[in-house]
Amino acid sequence: MAHLQRRPVSDCQSALAGKRRLRQKGRVSEEIIDEPAEQPAEVPVTFADLGLSEAVLAGVTKAGYERPTGIQAQAIPVILEGRDVIGSSQTGSGKTAAFALPVLSMLGAPGKLRVLILEPVRELAAQVEEQFLKYGGEAGIRSLLIHGGVGYGKQREGLERGVDVLIATPGRLLDLMQQRAIDLRDLEVLILDEVDRMLDMGFLPDVRRIVQKCPEKRQTLLFSATIPSEIASLASFALKDPFKIEVGRPRGAATTVSHYFYPVNRLQREELFLALLKETEFKSVMVFTRTKSDADLLAARVKSQGEFKVALMHGDIAQKDRAKALGGFRSGEFDVIIATDVAARGLDVTGVSHVINYSVPENPEDYVHRIGRTGRAEKEGDAFTILSADELPAAEAVERFIGQKVERRRLPNFDYEYTTLLDDSRAAQNSLRESLSRGRLRVGKKRR
Ligand code: AMP
């Protein structure tokens, strides 16, 4: 049986030193909780410095990556060393490769089921599998996706054929474990990914149950954008002496995204949205709505205009149609995808040039996730959020959360109707605040 190959710390030190150099140049905004030992600060970080296997390095070259991102430079050597890790990083930071590359290096050749990755939703699980195939294809590493919403047959067959890496959502995994279709005896690495999302979805009890069924002697990696007390408690239950890595400001908007609020009279929201879409030079746009009915409505409007090809993605859309929508958006068949938050977190589509929030998300953290769909992997992107007066408290909550004021912009040549939001006078702003605090809003007709 092929066991995981761990590497001694000393082999990894040049990489850590290089990472510090990048930080001094200000190219990587990162903060390390466990500062590694002092090293000469002159060696640049390349993937070759990190101690990855030749096969995985070939996969990285094939993927076209030039240098490791901040979280990769920090996490890869520590994971190769065999330590448990808690990682938090900005969305789109290259986190998946930060764990996939070292794990594939350690796996070497196909063998028994040695790696289990838990993901909150099937789309994320599918994305992780794609990356494993991309980097591990050459070595013949077999991965399998386990998630609900589809039949058991193919998943059982896959398990019977044998796999090295299982990528699963908790509910279906537990079902199959109860049916004794999964043998975790030889498991060596357990990865708990997007744990804050699992917490939101009420999955933490299932996650604990799964952790209890894993062999005690294992390496555990936990990734979460934020670490509230419930997750800290899961971490102390599941991890041993973890190395903590924090890259970027975990609550911050991705630094590669320029984002703006577009104030508008509530009655003109749809009109402004269609105008923004028309006036913006985009490559591909992800549009987020608060509700499924808004998503349906907008998709119908954009379709009826006949200018753009549009896909729709929300919780009431069947899994196979969601996969088609996402696949078509990725391949460029659709220019625009309209989605509720089901699609906002973690979904990785390269080259999304713009995000439009049809309304301000209720939960400030969703704002960060939504706008993080663009500006990925250190590319630049723009995010526009349509803001009406009744959403001002939500907009201010976003600004408090990300610790910055978001610039207000107006679309030139748009025939704005009056709203106090557009009125910069102090009197108008005071009256708006007063109305909001009394729960009343004026929807005026005055043209501007
Ligand atoms: P993730 O944060 O894992 O969702 O990754 C975001 C995107 O970055 C994915 O499309 C990866 O393929 C891409 N990516 C990961 N690592 C690198 C790298 N070192 N250089 C360029 N792109 C990368």
Image (spheres, rainbow, N blue to C red):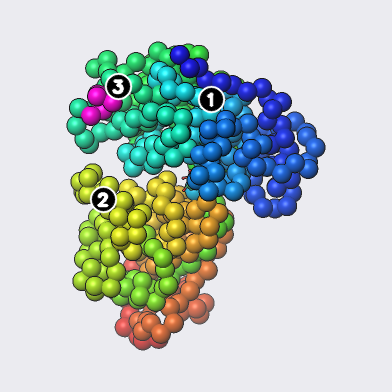
Mark 3 or 1, nearer chain start: 1
Q: Amino acid at mark 3?
A: Arg
Residue at the spot x=61%, y=46% of the render? 67
Tell whether position 106 is magenta: no
Name the residue furthest bottom.
Answer: 447
Question: Please, is residue 48 above or below residue 180 in the view?
Answer: below
Reading the image, the residue beneath label 1 is: 106
Q: Quadrant of the C terminus?
A: bottom left
Q: For the image shown, how many numbered marks are present on the structure?
A: 3
Q: Earlier in the sequence, mark 2 or mark 3?
A: 3
Q: CA distance from mark 2 to mark 3?
A: 27 Å
Q: Which mark is residue 161?
A: 3
Q: Find disc 2 in the rendering and name its residue.
A: 324
Q: Is residue 261 visible?
A: yes
Question: Residue 58: x, y in percent?
Answer: 54, 38
Q: Secondary structure at mark 1?
A: helix
Amino acid type, mark 1 = Met
Question: What secondary structure characterizes most of the magenta part?
Answer: helix
User: Which tag is nearer the camera, tag 2 or tag 3?
Assistant: 3
In the rendered image, the vertical position of residue 84 relative to residue 406, given as above or below:
above
Q: Residues within 10 Å of mark 1 (few under 14, many from 20)?
A: many
Q: Residue 310: percent from the left, percent from the top?
A: 27, 63
Q: Position of residue 359 (x, y in %)?
A: 36, 62
